[in-house]
């Protein structure tokens, strides 16, 4: 048979909807289906609607995108109770909060329409004053299910966000009867904005009048509103008559006054951590002198007591004062990799709400390299040569998450032995003129262990006299020395060390030579803003190693520990990498 559920046609507002089930009509004797209907939004940029349903209140296991229409037909099992909500999305891919929840049970037909049962108000129990909320079960500390992320942009000004996702539900929705009580949550925002209203999670037995209140953390009432047109259960929402402006990084309290208890209560929820849904945060209980909060009273009163760091499932409707920029991956290129040598690269992004979560799609990283999803760091040791293309995707911390992506690639080659900092590159100023006897050099490090087999420098034709090569630790211990012989008139000169010197990975050393009459190569500001990276060798920027290049005047060889204008004196080495890190 076909079952049609007709629904009150009320206007829907983005992020806030109303949906009420009236009844159903039997149309056919075979197939069981249910048609739900709702009024269209008044906004002109609505792109469509999504119908979410399942067999448990607040848990919607199936989503149907019905497009830009105000009805949806579901194929269901006869005799089973279902629960459904509707959301809308606009042309900017922003999705609303869920509507109120409706429930229904497809059943064998009768020849005439049968009204769907309306929720029967539960009688208010005779409250017995109780010094603290008294939930009976001991739920797990973190009952909020992980919602399926929706890759839509961060809410812009005019959109509304909350501490919890629209489909979050308590582990304990009904803590039992109690006296009139105010229950709430302490929260803060990273940015200034306005609160347009509040919401709370309601059990079916939580009947009676409910009042929303917003307070400073010291108890000044900022806004209040009565909940009206509530559904039988689930999230209930109310708007303030006037939005309330809140300051960044300031703690406030949002609360709900319930007359008969039966409020949601998940104990120890804030015991070891808070909830972070940037820009909103509900801090841990220990960090704000207690979270969630309550106070008993026949009327609304500031809730300043706590019990077992319980979450009473009160939320806010927050509108940011500034628009969030779109997430964009800013990394344009990645360093090449070399087989057998440790790799280091990183991904970066801007916009949205940091921190970001990283994934690789549309390809793969080179074998042996891995991505740190939290930091964007790419590390490891490549084992196979070739070019690997992939797409790097960054997701921000907003709800729903905003994403940005960029296609990138890493080229993996084999190391050329020997390796030097410079190959096929010459100075801009090969002859800086006459000078006194001086030791000049460069600080360097290697990603991998290996041996230094030779030292070299670039010579101008006027740079005559004796030249002596030296290798030092970064603290001035001389590790090797050798005299240059059989020099050419100009260009690169090289002397082999009688015994290769082993060096340790990721350790700074100094290689230098002694010139007696000046006329050395000197390119000023060479290391001022960037270093030299010839994997696995690196000559760092001057600021990152306490100065690069280095010099010291003396008639004899001496450790060069002075710098001038981050100059490059064009001293180099020949390095034989090891087979591992």
Image (cartoon, helix red, strand yellow):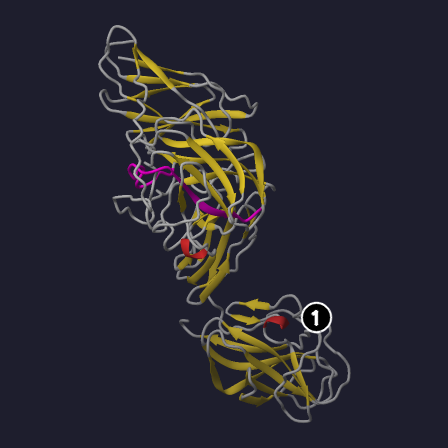
Position of residue 492 relative to residue 290, above or below, is: below
Mark 1: secondary structure: loop
State whether the magenta stretch is mostly helix, strand or loop: loop
State the residue in front, 139 or 344. 139
Residue 24, given in percent of the width and then of the height, sits at: 32, 13
State the residue in front, 305 or 434. 305
**Residue beneath the point at 57% across and 81% down:** 510
Residue 470, given in percent of the width and then of the height, sits at: 58, 86
**Residue beneath the point at 44% across and 55% down:** 289
Query: Total number of numbered labels?
Result: 1
Point out the image quarter for the C terminus: bottom left
Q: Is residue 137 visible?
A: yes
Residue 228, given in percent of the width and then of the height, sits at: 44, 26
Name the outermost residue toward the bottom. Answer: 555
State the residue in front, 167 or 581. 167
Stretch in magenta: 168-191
**Residue beneath the point at 77% across and 81% down:** 433
Name the outermost residue toward the top. Answer: 111
Q: Is residue 67 left or right of residue 307?
A: right
Where does label 1 land, which residue? 525
Point out the image quarter for the N terminus: top left
Residue 59, given in percent of the width and then of the height, sits at: 33, 34
**Residue beneath the point at 29% across and 25% down:** 82
Disc 1 residue crowd, few under 14, some 14–19, many 20+, Cα 10 Å: some
Q: Is residue 532 left or right of residue 366?
A: right
Residue 175 lies in the magenta stretch: yes
Q: Is residue 96 visible?
A: no
Position of residue 458 relative to residue 355, above or below, is: below
Residue 439 lies in the magenta stretch: no
């Amino acid at each position: 048979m076909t079952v049609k559920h007709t629904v009150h046609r009320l206007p829907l507002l983005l992020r806030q909807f109303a949906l009420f089930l009236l009844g159903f009509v039997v149309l056919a004797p075979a197939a069981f289906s249910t048609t739900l209907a709702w009024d269209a939004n008044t906004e002109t940029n609505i792109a469509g609607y999504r119908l979410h349903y399942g067999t448990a209140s607040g848990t919607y296991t199936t989503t149907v995108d019905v497009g830009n229409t105000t009805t949806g037909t579901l194929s269901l099992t006869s005799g089973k109770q279902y629960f459904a909500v509707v959301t809308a999305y606009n042309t900017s891919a922003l999705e609303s909060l869920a509507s109120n929840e409706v429930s229904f049970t497809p059943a064998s037909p009768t020849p005439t329409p049968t009204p769907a049962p309306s929720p029967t108000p539960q009688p208010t129990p005779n409250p017995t004053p109780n010094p603290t909320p008294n939930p009976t079960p001991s739920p797990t500390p973190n009952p909020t299910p992980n919602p399926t992320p929706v890759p839509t942009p961060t809410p812009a000004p005019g959109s509304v966000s909350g501490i919890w996702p629209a489909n979050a539900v308590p582990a304990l929705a009904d803590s039992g009867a109690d006296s009139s009580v105010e229950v709430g949550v302490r929260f803060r925002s990273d940015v200034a904005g306005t609160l347009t209203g509040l919401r709370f999670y309601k059990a079916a037995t939580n009947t009676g009048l409910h009042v929303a209140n917003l307070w400073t953390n010291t108890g000044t009432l900022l806004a209040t509103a009565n909940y009206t047109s509530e559904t039988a259960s689930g999230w209930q929402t109310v708007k303030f008559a006037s939005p309330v402006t809140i300051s960044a990084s300031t703690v406030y309290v949002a609360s709900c006054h319930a007359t008969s208890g039966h409020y949601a209560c998940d104990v120890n929820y804030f015991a070891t951590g808070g909830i972070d849904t940037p820009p909103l945060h509900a801090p841990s209980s220990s960090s704000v002198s207690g979270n969630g909060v309550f106070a008993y009273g026949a009327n609304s009163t500031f809730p300043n007591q706590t019990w077992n760091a319980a979450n009473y499932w009160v939320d806010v409707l927050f509108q940011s004062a500034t628009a969030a920029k779109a997430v964009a991956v800013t990394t344009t290129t990645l360093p090449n990799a070399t087989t057998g040598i440790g790799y280091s690269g990183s991904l970066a992004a801007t916009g949205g709400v940091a921190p970001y979560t990283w994934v690789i799609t549309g390809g793969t990283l080179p074998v042996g390299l891995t991505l740190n999803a939290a930091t964007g760091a790419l590390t490891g040791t490549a084992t196979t040569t070739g070019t690997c293309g992939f797409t790097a995707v960054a997701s921000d911390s907003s709800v729903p998450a905003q994403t940005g992506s960029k296609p990138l690639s890493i080229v993996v080659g084999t190391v050329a032995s020997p390796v030097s900092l410079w190959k096929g590159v010459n100075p801009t100023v090969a002859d800086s003129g006459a000078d006194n006897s001086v030791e000049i050099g460069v600080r360097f490090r290697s990603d991998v262990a290996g041996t230094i087999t030779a030292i070299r420098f670039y010579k101008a034709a006027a740079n005559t006299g004796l030249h002596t090569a030296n290798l030092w630790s970064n603290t001035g211990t001389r590790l090797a020395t050798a005299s240059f012989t059989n020099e050419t008139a100009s260009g690169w000169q090289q002397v082999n060390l009688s015994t290769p010197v082993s060096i340790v990975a990721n350790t700074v050393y100094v290689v230098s030579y002694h010139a007696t009459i000046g006329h050395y190569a000197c390119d000023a500001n060479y290391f001022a803003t960037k270093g030299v990276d010839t994997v696995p060798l690196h000559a760092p920027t001057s600021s990152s190693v306490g100065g690069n290049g280095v010099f010291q005047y003396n008639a004899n060889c001496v450790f060069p520990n002075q710098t001038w204008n981050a100059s490059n004196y064009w001293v180099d080495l020949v390095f034989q990498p090891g087979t591992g890190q």
